Image: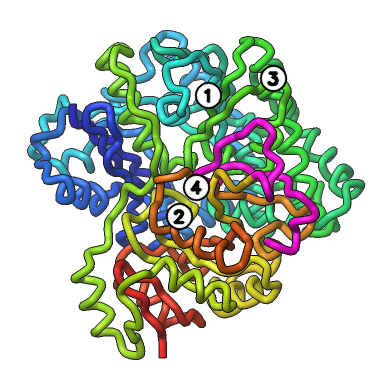
Amino acid sequence: MNILGIHDGHNASAALLVGRTLVRVVQEERFSGLKNHGGFPARAVEWILRDTGLRPEDLDAVVLGQWSKSTGYTREEILASYHRTATEPPPVVRDWIRQTRVQVLRQAGVYEQFKARFDTARFSAARSALPTVDADRITAVDHHTAHAAGAYYGAHFTGEPALVLTLDGQGDGLCATVNVADAGGVRRIASTPAGHSIGDIYARVTHLMGMVPLEHEYKLMGLAPYVEDEKAEKVSRIFEQYVEVDGLAFRRRTPEATPYIGARLKRDLEYVRFDAIAAGLQRFTEKRMVEWARNALRHTGLRKLALGGGTFMNVKANGLIARLDEVDDIFICPSCGDESLSLGAAWQYHADRTGGRERPEPLDTLYLGPDIDPAEAIAVAAATPGAEVVADRDLPQRVAELLADGEIVARCAGRTEFGARALGNRSLFADPARPLATRTLNQAIKMRDFWMPFAPIMLSDRQGAYLLNPKGIRSPHMMFAYDTYPERFADMASALQPADRTARAQLVLRGQNPEVEAMLEAFEARTGRAVVLNTSYNIHGEAMVSTPAQGLDVLRRSGLKWLWLGPLLVRKR
C-alpha cells in the first residue's frame, strides 16, 4: 500500500508510507521558509510524489491527521486568537455545549461519521490538490489516535506490549489519552477532555510573557533552571491550583477552561519576576506529567512507554519520566508536536487496514526530506557573490580541523531531517569546549535570546564518558535531557544548559549518518573530545534551511564564515 499522511494545521507536514516503511516525511516550512507554516501542505505533497516517482492515482489512501480543522495558521493569527481569549470573558456556556456535544458523539461511537458528513470542507483542500484520487480514498483519523500511532508504531519495541500516552494543548476535543498497545494495535483506556490541559497553560503563559505561543515554549523551559528551587516552588504552587491529576486523567480546578485562563494568569502572576514564572511553570508541568505517567504505569503494569503529542517536546519532563522506577524502556515520537500527525495518520490507517498482521518498520531515521543535488550545490555556490569553494573531498576531516581550530561550520548536506531539531544534516557545529562559541552563535548567527542553551551531538557508544544514562535510553532525535558528569563539564560547557548542566543530547547510532559519524571521530582524534556542539541551521524566527540556495542565503546574511554544502566546503570571503 502507498499511504499519504497529511497534517494540514499549524506546522503542516506530509508523510508517505510504502508498504511497511516510512520513506518520506517533510514539513511545509522547508519549502516556504515560513517557520511552522500552516494550512494544506501542497508543496510537501508535490515534492513527495515527484521525489518517489508516484502519481496521485498510485496512492491507496490519503489520510488526514485530525477531524477538526485547525484555525489560525500564521503568527499574526495565532497571536490575535490568544489575545482575544486572554481579554474576553470566557464563554462558559458555549464551551460546555461544545464539549458535551463531542462527548455525546464519542460515547455513541458516531463522532467520526458526524465529522465526515457535516464537515465536508475538511477534505476540500486534499481533493483539490489531488483531483485524480478517488474521493473515497481520502479519509481522516482522530487527532490523539494519530499521536498515539506516531508514538507506538515508530518505537523500536513496536509489537511488544507497551503503554502509550498522548498529551498536548488539544485536538479533536481531547488533550490527553492513555492507551495500551501490542501486536494487535493501540486501544484507548482513558482520556481527558479539552479544557483541562497543562499544555494549554504552558502556551498561555508563553503568550503572557510576550512570546509566540505554539512556538516559543522552549524558551521558558530554557530559562527555568536559572531560578532557585525555593522561588520556583513558590510559583509552582500557583499553577497547581489550576489543574490536578485525577487517576488517569487531568482535571481543572478553575471554573474557566484552560484556553480562557489568560485573565487569571495575568492577575495571579502580577509582580512575579519573569524568570520565576518560567521556573514555576516548568516545575508544575514536570510534577503533573510525572504523576500522571506513574499512575498510568502502575495501573497497567506495563514497563515500556511510548509518548506522543506536543507537550512531550519538553525534554526536561521526558528525562524525569524516563528515570521512573516503573520504566524499563521509552520512546518518544520524534518532533512529536502536530507536525508528527502526518506520519501517525499513515501508520494508523495501515494498522486499521492490515488488522495488525503487518507491523510497520520502526522509525530508525528522520533523514527523509529533500536531498542536496551536487550539481545544484555547485551551480548555486558559483553564482553566490562572496562564496568561495575551498574543498570538495575529505570534508568530515576538513570540518573537524576547522572546529578544533575554533571555527563555526554549518552543514547543509544529505537529506533534510524531519522536525524541529537539527540532527546533523541542517546543523551548525562548534567546539563545545570554547566558552565564546555560544556568544558568537547567538549574536552573529542565530540572533536569538542569550539564555537559550545549545545541545551536544556524539556517537551513542561514546556517551558513557559524558552522560548519566544508566538505563541506556536511546536519544537519536534529541527528545531527552540527561544529567552530565561534573568532571567533563569543561569538555562540553557550551553545549549544556549552563545553570543545571543538563544536556539535550543527540546520540548518533552507528551507521545512521556516516559523514557526521566520520566528522565526530576525526574531531575526537584531533582533540580527545568525542562531543560537538549542534544547533539548527537557521536565523532565529525562520525555518531551518533545506536547499543549497537557502543554506547560502543564511551564510550571506549572518556572521557565519564556513558552510559544508553537499559535496563542497564553502567559505565566505
What label sits on residue 127 in the rendered view?
none
Say whether marks 2 and 1 touch (CB < 8 Å): no
Q: To which residue does mark 2 refer?
A: 517
Q: Dot 2, how many residues are within 10 Å of its Cα: few (below 14), some (14-19), or many (20+)?
A: some
Residue for point 45% across, 25% down: 152
Residue for point 55% across, 49% down: 506
- x and y percentages locating residue 32 in the rendered image: 32, 62
Say whether marks 4 and 2 touch (CB < 8 Å): yes
SS at mark 3? loop
Cα gap from disc 4 to disc 3, whole angstroms: 26 Å
Q: Answer above or below: position of 375 versus 301.
A: below
Q: To which residue does mark 3 refer?
A: 326
Please state which of residues 256 and 500 is positioned toward the viewer in this rendering.
500
Type of the residue with mark 1:
Gln
Indicate which label's residue lies in the foreground, 1 or 4: 4
Cα gap from disc 2 to disc 1, whole angstroms: 50 Å
Span highlighted in magenta in the image: 464-491
What label sits on residue 508 in the rendered view?
4
Quadrant containing the N terminus is: top left
Instruction: Please indicate whether residue 25 sits to the left or right of residue 99 in the image.
Output: left
Q: Answer above or below: position of 520 versus 570.
A: above
Q: To which residue does mark 1 refer?
A: 99
Indicate which label's residue lies in the foreground, 4 or 3: 4
Cα gap from disc 1 to disc 4, whole angstroms: 44 Å
| Colour mapping used in the image | rainbow
Cα gap from disc 4 to disc 2, whole angstroms: 8 Å
Disc with the residue nearer the chain's start (2 vs 1) = 1
Disc with the residue nearer the chain's start (4 vs 2) = 4
Please state which of residues 402 and 228 is positioned toward the viewer in this rendering.
402
Instruction: Please indicate whether residue 142 sits to the left or right of residue 62 in the image.
Output: right
Type of the residue with mark 4:
Val
